[in-house]
Image (cartoon, rainbow, N blue to C red):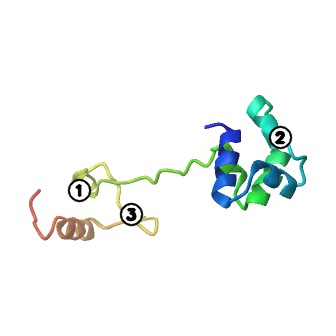
């Protein structure tokens, strides 16, 4: 989806025509239509359009990639002797670590 298409879609969702958005942003009536003709909007222009629509510039450009959180397979981690488990930056004592592993396995002591 192009920047123009995103602006058009968000404008429609907000109940505005592209001309209304342009005027609300302090641009000429047909300013936004130029972006459908291959003209790339400058950041400052995108910022005033985004402000007029109450969205972020990233919403208009499609650059709002959300980070994927790291996930840990706890079942693999408990049985992996190469995983270093710490608490508040300090290694967990081996006897406490074994107790925690047993609890995480559901009380079963053998792997």
Along the line of sight, the residue nearer the viewer: 59 or 30? 30
6 to the left or right of 110: right
Please report whichever mark, 1 or 3, sits nearer to the chain's N-terminal start: 1
Please report whichever mark, 2 or 1, sits nearer to the chain's N-terminal start: 2
Quote the CA–CA distance across marks 2 and 3: 48 Å
| Rendered residue at 81%/49% (across/down) | 19
Q: Mark 2 and mark 3 in contact? Answer it, CB < 8 Å.
A: no
In the picture of the structure, the residue carrying the numbered disc 2 is 42
- Would you call the spot at circle 3 few (<14 residues within 10 Å), some (14-19), or many (20 or more)? few
In this rendering, the label closer to the viewer, 2 or 1: 2
The image shows residue 23 at horizontal and vertical percentages of: 87, 54
Choose top left, top right, bottom left or bottom right for residue 26.
bottom right
| Rendered residue at 53%/51% (across/down) | 67
Callout 2: helix, strand or loop?
loop
The image shows residue 21 at horizontal and vertical percentages of: 79, 54
Callout 3: helix, strand or loop?
strand
Please report whichever mark, 2 or 3, sits nearer to the chain's N-terminal start: 2
In this rendering, the label closer to the viewer, 1 or 3: 1
- Would you call the spot at circle 1 few (<14 residues within 10 Å), some (14-19), or many (20 or more)? few
In the picture of the structure, the residue carrying the numbered disc 1 is 75
The image shows residue 71 at horizontal and vertical percentages of: 38, 54
Q: Is residue 4 above or below residue 14?
A: above
Image mark for residue 86:
3
- Would you call the spot at circle 2 few (<14 residues within 10 Å), some (14-19), or many (20 or more)? few
Q: Is residue 101 above or below residue 43?
A: below
| Rendered residue at 26%/65% (across/down) | 94
Along the line of sight, the residue nearer the viewer: 29 or 81? 29
């Amino acid at each position: 989806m192009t920047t123009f298409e995103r602006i058009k879609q968000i404008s429609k969702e907000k109940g505005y025509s592209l001309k209304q958005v342009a005027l609300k942003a302090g641009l000429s009536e047909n300013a936004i239509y130029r972006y459908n003709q291959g003209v790339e909007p400058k950041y400052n222009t995108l910022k005033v359009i985004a402000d007029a629509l109450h969205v972020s510039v990233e919403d208009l450009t499609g650059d709002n990639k959300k980070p994927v959180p790291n996930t840990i397979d706890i079942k693999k981690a408990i049985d992996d002797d190469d995983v270093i488990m710490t608490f508040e930056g300090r290694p967990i004592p081996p006897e406490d670590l074994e107790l925690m592993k047993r609890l995480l396995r559901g009380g079963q002591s053998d792997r």
